[in-house]
Each structure stands twice: as structure tokens, then as C-alpha cells.
Amino acid sequence: MSGRAPFMGEKIEHARRTLTARFRAAHIEAAELDVRVLMCAALGLDLSGLIASAARGLTRAEADRLQEFAIRRLSGEPVARIVGEREFWGLPLKLSAATLVPRPDTETVVELALETIRPSLHCAVRIGDIGTGSGAILLALLHEVAEAFGVGTDISPDALRTARRNAAELGLLPRAAFVVCDYAAALGEAFELIVSNPPYIATGDIAGLATEVRDHDPLAALDGGADGLDAYRALIPQAAALLAPGGALVVEAGQDQAEPIQALMAAAGLIVRHPAKTDLAGVPRAVSGLKRPR
């Protein structure tokens, strides 16, 4: 894939087939889907527009952009990084170098959080999202709970700028605030719900992660220390102190981490009544603990 604009003058449909074959030859999973997404971004079209334009030839500018996107994908860069956006909970979210690419597994945290606060869905719930990144979990919850107000924290100002932009573009900024701090260190008010997807990969396992994650997600959002639990040891006691009576903490867990996280919650005085909620692969993915009611 070198040289100048190899797609220039090609019909869109032919370029799509050619690039799909190249991605498959490079053993890229979901090659056809990746090509469709990249071509839509390179040409400024939605899927229906791409189909309707199948017989049209690519312009020089379009061919150049498609070539650039193809090279980046073949080098292992995730499609979401290339196009700068990822859908989460049906919401389009902008990304930056300081944020993780939101993953479907994390929607399990949103599901469990909504189940946990179901009796309060029409009340003025205060939500805290510790290590908010792109704002994915917080904004999904604010989208679902019309009376809620949320605060997202992150140690990275760049990540918070991305989260704030996402909140603004989704029309949720009036009900969201963002604070730079380490975990929940700058928070002081009571929350009915606190959520988090903290770094939970054991340091020694990072080298074995997929290229898309290891080389493109921010290390600080991945590295959970020697056993992957350092972030939980820090944030769970902070969150327990900030929860209102009867409030809930819901966190994402890595493989085989649900039980140790539940033990940390219990040690912080939280009640762990329910088993972890599993993701689509059957992995216990979301863990919750409740603060005792008065």
C-alpha cells in the first residue's frame, strides 16, 4: 500500500472490494465492516450514500484520504481511532489520544447501574463517574435518566475536554460537570450512584494485549498494577465515603476480578447482595455494592 493515491479514478464499489480483499489478506477481523466505515468517513457519506454512489469514480482527495486510512488500519490502528468516533449505548462519542475506545462490554456497567437505581429513575439522581475518559458511561446514564445530574472525574485534562465536547454535542452539558482529579479526590457531595471503568489490566499482561489496545489506548487507562486491582483499592473506599445512604457503586471488572472486587467493597462497608452481571461472552463484567440505608 505505497505510492500515490492508488484508488484514484477507481469506481467506489471496485475500491471497496479491493480494500476488503487487502484487509482479509492481512487477517483483519471484520474486514468488510471496517472498509465500509473507513470509506464512509473518507468520502463523507453515510451507508446509504455509499451504496448509491457505488458506480462513481473517486476524486483525488477521496483517494488520498482512503489511502491514508487504509495504511493506518493495516498498521494496526483501530477504526474508531482513525475516524475519531465510536458509538456507545447508541450515542456517537468523539475520541482523543487521552481516552479509551469505549467497548460494548462496558455497556454492562450501564445496564447494571440502571437496574440498581431503577426506583429512582424519575428523581434528581446525582451520578459520579470516576475516570470518565470520553464520558461514555456518564453520558449514557444521563441520556437514560432525565432528572439526573452527573460529575465526571479524570486525571487527564485532555480526556475531560473530550468528555465535555461529547456532553455538549449530545445536549447533556447542562446536566454534567467535569473535574480534574485523581479518582474521586476532589468530590465532596453525596451521590446516589457512582460508576467507574478503572484501569484493570495487570502490568505484566499489557505486552500481550491486541495491537489495537496496547499501542493505541492510553497506558494510564489500562495499567492496573501488579494484580490489576490497584485502582479499585484506591477508588472503592473513596466512593463508599461519597455515597448517600442507600446509594450504589457499580464498576467494571476484568477477567476473574469480580470476587476480589466484591471483597474490597465489603471491606469498605458496602453491601454486596447480587452476583456480578455478565457481558455477552459470559464474563462477570459489572460489580455493584450498596451503602447501608439509614
Image (cartoon, rainbow, N blue to C red):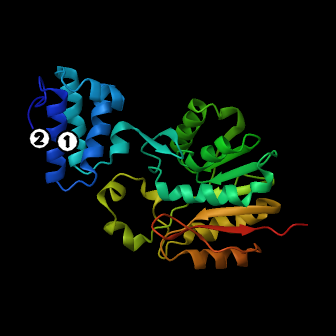
Q: Could you tell me how many numbered marks the image carries?
A: 2
Instruction: Identify the residue shown where x is 59% and y is 59%.
Output: 109
Q: Is residue 166 left or right of residue 125?
A: left
Query: Which mark sits nearer the N-terminus, 1 or 2?
Result: 2
Q: Residue at x 19, y 44 (%)?
A: 20
Q: For this rendering, which residue is in front, 186 or 44?
A: 44
Q: Amino acid at mark 1?
A: Ile
**Residue 137 visible to the viewer:** yes
Q: Which residue is mark 2?
A: 1
* Image coords of residue 194 (percent x, y): 70, 57
**Residue 204 on image: x %, y %:** 38, 73
Give the vertical position of 268 relative to 105 (above or below): below
Single out the residue that lies furthest toward the left: 3
Q: Position of residue 160 (x, y in %)?
A: 57, 42
Q: Amino acid type of disc 2?
A: Met
In the rendered image of this protein, does residue 122 appear above or below residue 64? below
In this rendering, would 241 be left or right of 220? right
The reply to whether discs 1 and 2 touch (Cβ–Cβ < 8 Å) is yes
Q: CA distance from mark 1 to mark 2?
A: 7 Å
Where does label 1 land, which residue? 71
Q: In the image, what residue occupies the spot 60% across and 46% down?
A: 140
> Camera-side residue: 251 or 35?
35
Image quarter of residue 192: bottom right
Q: Measuring 56% from the left and 70% from the top, which residue is drawn there?
A: 230
Does residue 178 appear in the picture of this structure?
A: no
Q: How many neighbours does mark 2 have within 10 angstroms: few (below 14), some (14-19), or many (20 or more)?
A: few
Is 142 left or right of 71, judged from the image as shown? Answer: right
Q: Mark 1, residues whose alpha carbon is within 10 Å: few (<14), some, or many (≥20)?
A: few
- Could you say whether the residue bearing mark 2 is in a helix, strand or loop? loop
